[in-house]
Each structure stands twice: as C-alpha cells, then as structure tokens.
Image (cartoon, rainbow, N blue to C red):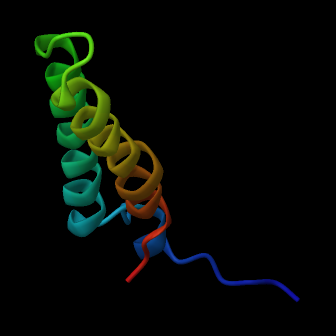
Amino acid sequence: MKEKYNKQNAYDWTFKRNNYLLFLSGIIFVLFGYILMYTGDVNSYQSITIAPFLLVIGYCILIPVSILYKK
C-alpha cells in the first residue's frame, strides 16, 4: 500500500522548545561543573563532590532526557 506523503510533516522540527531548553540546561550544568572543578583546590569539597555531581546530572540525565523526550 502506498502511504500518502504529507508536506506538512516534512518541514516540522524534530525537537520542540522543551527539548532545546532541557539540552541547554544540561550544557549549563556541564559547563558549571567544569568551572567548579577548575577553580577549586585539588582536594576541596567543591572539586571532589559538587563538580562531579553536576557533571553526572548534565551528561547522564539532562542531555539524554532532552534527546529522548517527546511530547
């Protein structure tokens, strides 16, 4: 059977506004994590605990959710 080609669907964006906002927040978390890791001392609480936590949230939660989220 032949499927009808809909021109409207050809021009729709794959990601919506929510996806881009989640992706942007993930990038901000990652950048802030690297900044905290860079500015803290080698064995400070900031470099050992807070920065890796922000990086994990950014890389493992926010960015994948922004790609997989579909309304």
Q: Residue at x 29, y 50 (%)?
A: 23
- Looking at the image, residue 42 sits to the left or right of residue 41; the answer is right
Q: Residue furthest bottom?
A: 1
- Looking at the image, residue 3 sits to the left or right of residue 57; the answer is right
Where's residue 61, x and y in %?
41, 57
Q: Looking at this view, is 70 or 3 the one in front?
A: 70
Q: Residue at x 43, y 71 (%)?
A: 69
Where's residue 19, x and y in %?
30, 62
Quadrant assignment for the N terminus:
bottom right
Seen in the picture, residue 12 relative to 35 is either above or below; the reply is: below
Where's residue 63, x and y in %?
39, 50
- Looking at the image, residue 69 sits to the left or right of residue 50; the answer is right
Q: How many marks?
A: 0
Seen in the picture, residue 26 relative to 31 is either above or below; the reply is: below
Where's residue 51, x and y in %?
25, 33
Q: Residue at x 66, y 83 (%)?
A: 4
Q: Looking at this view, is 60 or 24 the one in front?
A: 60
Seen in the picture, residue 29 relative to 16 is either above or below; the reply is: above
Quadrant assignment for the C terminus:
bottom left
- Looking at the image, residue 6 sits to the left or right of residue 31; the answer is right
**Quadrant assignment, res 55:** top left
Q: Residue furthest right?
A: 1
Q: Looking at this view, is 32 or 2 the one in front?
A: 32
Q: Residue at x 53, y 77 (%)?
A: 6
